[in-house]
């Protein structure tokens, strides 16, 4: 099985899984992310205690890339400090922009590496980064206007 097939399998499994696609109990942050160019929408829920992301989940609709990317992201950030989650988000953005290409640096992204070649499909980049930008905004304390 080629590497492309492994990556496709990872994205398909995350897109079809409900493991991270659910509401969580007692979230401390809830933020909606929207990609108006294609209609992807997610609502990210985080529960943070003492600077650590104890739990996370998301709900929403969208293409397989946006849904799989959000699910992969949640696997990576659960149990991490907010600072580490932001570092991983920045590493992901660097990978997507082809600014970080060193495989040893990208190892921290684990299954998110499956999205590395999205940079060659500009129309899909916003799909891949939707959850990550929503995470970044949630950690920085931004709130949706309707949630204020």
Image (cartoon, rainbow, N blue to C red):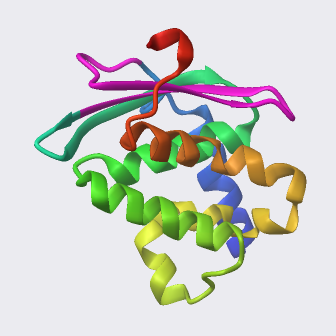
Kindly tell me whether residue 57 is visible in this rendering.
Answer: yes
Residue furthest to the left: 50
The stretch drawn in magenta includes residue 86 = no
**x then y, percent, for residue 81:** 23, 54
Choose top left, top right, bottom left or bottom right for residue 47: top left
The stretch drawn in magenta includes residue 42 = yes
* Up/down of 69 relative to 113, above or below: above
Q: Nearer the viewer, residue 9 or 132?
A: 132
Horizontal relation, residue 28 to residue 102: left or right: left
**x then y, percent, for residue 96:** 68, 67
Horizontal relation, residue 65 to residue 100: left or right: right
Horizontal relation, residue 38 to residue 35: left or right: right
Give the residues in magenta.
Answer: 23-47
Tell me which residue sits at (29%, 59%) in the image. 83
Tell me which residue sits at (50%, 78%) in the image. 106
Tell me which residue sits at (27%, 34%) in the image. 55
Q: Looking at the rendering, in which quadrant would you find the C terminus?
A: top left
Q: What's the magenta bit mostly, secondary-structure-wise? A: strand
**x then y, percent, for residue 146:** 54, 10
**x then y, percent, for residue 60:** 61, 21
Tell me which residue sits at (55%, 61%) in the image. 112
Q: Nearer the viewer, residue 36 or 8?
A: 36
* Up/down of 91 relative to 148, above or below: below
Q: Looking at the rendering, in which quadrant would you find the N terminus?
A: bottom right
């Amino acid at each position: 099985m080629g590497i492309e097939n492994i990556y496709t399998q990872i994205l398909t499994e995350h897109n079809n899984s409900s493991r991270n696609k659910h509401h969580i109990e007692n979230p401390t942050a809830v933020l909606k992310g929207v990609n108006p160019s294609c209609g992807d929408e997610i609502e990210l829920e985080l529960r943070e205690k003492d600077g650590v992301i104890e739990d996370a989940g998301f709900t929403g609709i969208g293409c397989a890339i946006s849904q799989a990317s959000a699910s992969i992201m949640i696997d990576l950030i659960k149990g991490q400090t907010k600072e580490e989650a932001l570092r991983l988000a920045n590493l992901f953005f660097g990978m997507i922009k082809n600014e970080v290409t060193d495989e040893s640096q990208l190892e921290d992204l684990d299954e998110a590496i499956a999205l590395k070649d999205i940079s060659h499909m500009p129309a899909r980049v916003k799909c891949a980064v939707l959850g990550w930008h929503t995470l970044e905004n949630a950690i920085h304390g931004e709130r949706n206007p309707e949630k204020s």
